[in-house]
Amino acid sequence: MSNSTLFGLKLTEFGVLDSSRNQESSWGSSIRTRNSRRCMLDSTSLFRSMILPEGEESLIISSMTSRTLGPAMKIISPFHLNSCHPKIGLPKCSQAAESKSMISILIPYTLARVLGVCSKLPFATSHSPFVCISNSSSKPLPLQLDVSLPLLHDIKWSFARLFYLFNMQLERNISMFFVVILAACFSFVVIGGLLFYRFRGKRQALEDCFWEAWACLCSSSTHLKQRTRTERIIGFILAVWGILFYSRLLSTMTEQLRNNMHRFREDAQMQVLEADHIIVCGVNSQLSFVLKQLNKYHEFSIRLGTANARRQKVLLLSDIPRKQMDKVVDNIAKDLNSIDVLTKSCSLSSTKSFEQAAADKARAIIILPTKQNQYEADSDAFISVLALQPLPMMTSIPTVVEVSSLSSYDLLKSISGLKVEPVINVAPKLFVQCSRQKGLISIYKHLLNYRKNVFNLCSFPHFCGLSYRQLRHGFQEAVVCGLYRGGNIYFHPNDEEILEKNDKVLFISSMQGMKKSEPFFHLDAEASDNSIKRDKAFRRSKESLRQGHGDTLPGLEKISTNRSAPEEYILVMGWRPDMVEMIKEYDKYLGPGSAVEFLSDVPLDERYKVNKNGIRLKLKNIEVLHKVGNPMEYDTLEDAIISLKSSFKKQDISFSIAAICDKEWHDGDLSRTDKNSVYSLHLAESICSKHGIKVHNLVAEIVNSKFGKQIARIRPSFVYIAAEEIMSLVTAQVAENSELNAVWKNILSANGNEICVKDIKLYIEPGENPSFRELSERAHLQGEVAIGYIKKNKKIINPSSKSEPLILDLNDDALIVISQPQGH
């Protein structure tokens, strides 16, 4: 379409349409108005013929052909745009009207020509709605506007919506309510001041009226001073609003303060400003034992005068909510008299969390496992240790981490820039050892109780040059166990070994004796023993070993002796993923042909996954059996006991029952776990009594040692083992003295030394009453360290009098020793 189309359209739009619209609206308009429009049409045609370029094609306005504009107007078309304008029977128009017409056409056309979009505009077609707008049949319909008032339901919903949005803002920021109250108060002061100013006839200054309105709002008695009725009403309203305002203001400030305090308690971004504190990471069943052990250590530190503060600060970090942490701590805090436990909820895998906990200023850091799966627990501990690595000055702060395997131990030890002290969790091994050796669990607790005799490592530079024999005989109030050299512990050094400057002596004594370790060192003839007695003891020990005279306590045999252990059957009620270590330990204690059967609800596929995860058991003496069932169901347990007893090849084979913390039980409440273990053990005892089956040993794994003591008093035939408590005490002791980690690692590891309770007949002959020093010498000749003895079921560790003769029963009493592992 050519540019003239737009021009022709503009002719129609500005000239013809106006005439047509006026014709349709009113035929009785004045002649002056019609003449003006005729002049506009005439001028438009003339202007179009003047500005179009010569040679432009003609424009035929089909829609305007023979269109009647009125009784006195008619356009004769077609016409050529380059020719003179068509003849229209109009009278001459004025010059002003013609100028207006020319301007009205020139402006839109010039803009279109400049922009070059004439042919693309939608109104440049013959079908444009403006072309036929004068046609009465094509008139647009009027807008159907709804001008009615909204319904009451809609109004209520709108107000409810506004109130909802307001409450949402208050929930996000409670201080907004404070702003709203201040705005309302200011509004009441302004309105009250204006009313006072209005009703007082403007006799008082506006500023004074505002001040009096504020006085009525602040002090309710001010409105009583008003004189007129109107002023009293205004003052009364302001006084009532003032009371409401201050009450809401006070409640808002209180809520804001409570909210800030809650955020302060829950805020993970809070910086801890403590020094020489102990950080405990993770919440599990061992937490109470760790905190109690730290509390006991600080109590004795205060007595010895080595404590830096009256109360030790302990910071508990965990990723669980702080309210839940406080609930756990509150249940333990009643037994903590020397430590203050602070809680902080944060991520244990973030460096920023440890930075805000002031880990670089801590005394020690303890990381406890929080997952039941040993692989997940070790990976979480590894990530937490890596988060500590970027912090400065961490090389001198011991980080005690409880891991499940030796591989994790080596991995954590390889991390540079940190003083990591991994503690291997050998709870299954402790359970088997303590269940096989009567009284062993109490010995471990004794050595981990700061109120009694514990392991100590001390340096004696002025003793350099003394032999190890002189050290063993010189300490009168302690039992020397070995030497600590180069980060390793040696329990059985040669007597001719010379003490070096950097060496430390490992001995067992009380915490009070640790303070006065130097004064009780006396080297005399009686302490050193003459050669005749040593030769006599040596010959007696060798003769006893050759004859096989004596052994460990009956039923508590260990493979490390020359005689092999007898065959035995054990029913274990429960299953956990860490049962592999327990099975290995049973293989060491039981003789060839023995069997261990596990009864649990855990499916067989899940049990067999233990071997598929890379742990291949190489068992020499036992056969592992599995049975699926609930050990708390009478029929299931009865069937398991009878079927296992019927498989005995010999009638005199000993039979034992052990109840451990089952995986299904361990996922719930710990108190319920202990109750289930004790209940299943009682049920098993009643079944054996019913069928006349003799049970050699009844052992239950208990988490709460207080509950275990209560059960032991009621049923003396039960033996309770709190292996998790032992591991917790070891972890806490290593946190206080990181060098003791080497001692406990050697004692608790599979290939290290171990604490044993051995028959006293292995060391003395009938009718002989040796002293403890002589018993220690005889144990030393067998590669053992005697640390105490058991007399009449009472354990005595580090006897105060080591030279007095002892009257021991050859059948019931025993010697407590630290012995070398098998093959050493």
Image: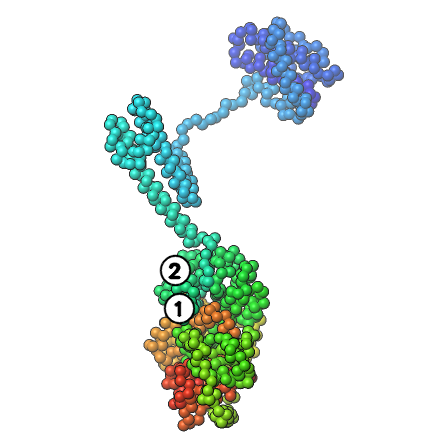
Q: How many marks?
A: 2
Q: Is residue 784 above or below residue 743?
A: below
Name the side, left or right, on which 484 lies relative to 208.
right
Q: Position of residue 147 (x, y in %)?
A: 43, 26
Of all residues, the one furthest to the right in this rendering is 55
Which residue is tagged 2? 327
Q: Quadrant of the C terminus?
A: bottom right
Residue at the location (44% across, 85% down)?
Answer: 815
Closer to us: 227 or 641: 227
Q: Position of residue 430 (x, y in %)?
A: 47, 76
Tell me the number on the disc at residue 302.
1
Of all residues, the one furthest to the front in this rendering is 462
Q: Is residue 781 above or below residue 509?
A: below
Q: Position of residue 40 (x, y in %)?
A: 61, 11
User: Is mark 2 in CB contact (under 8 Å) with mark 1?
Assistant: no
Which amino acid, mark 1? Ile
Q: Secondary structure at mark 1?
A: helix
Which amino acid, mark 2? Lys
Q: Secondary structure at mark 2?
A: helix
Determine which quarter of the picture holds residue 310: bottom left
- Give the foreground label among 2 and 1: 1
Residue at the location (45% across, 56% down)?
Answer: 273
Residue at the location (61% across, 5% down)?
Answer: 91
Closer to us: 569 or 325: 325
Which circle's residue, 2 or 1, is located before the other in the chain? Answer: 1
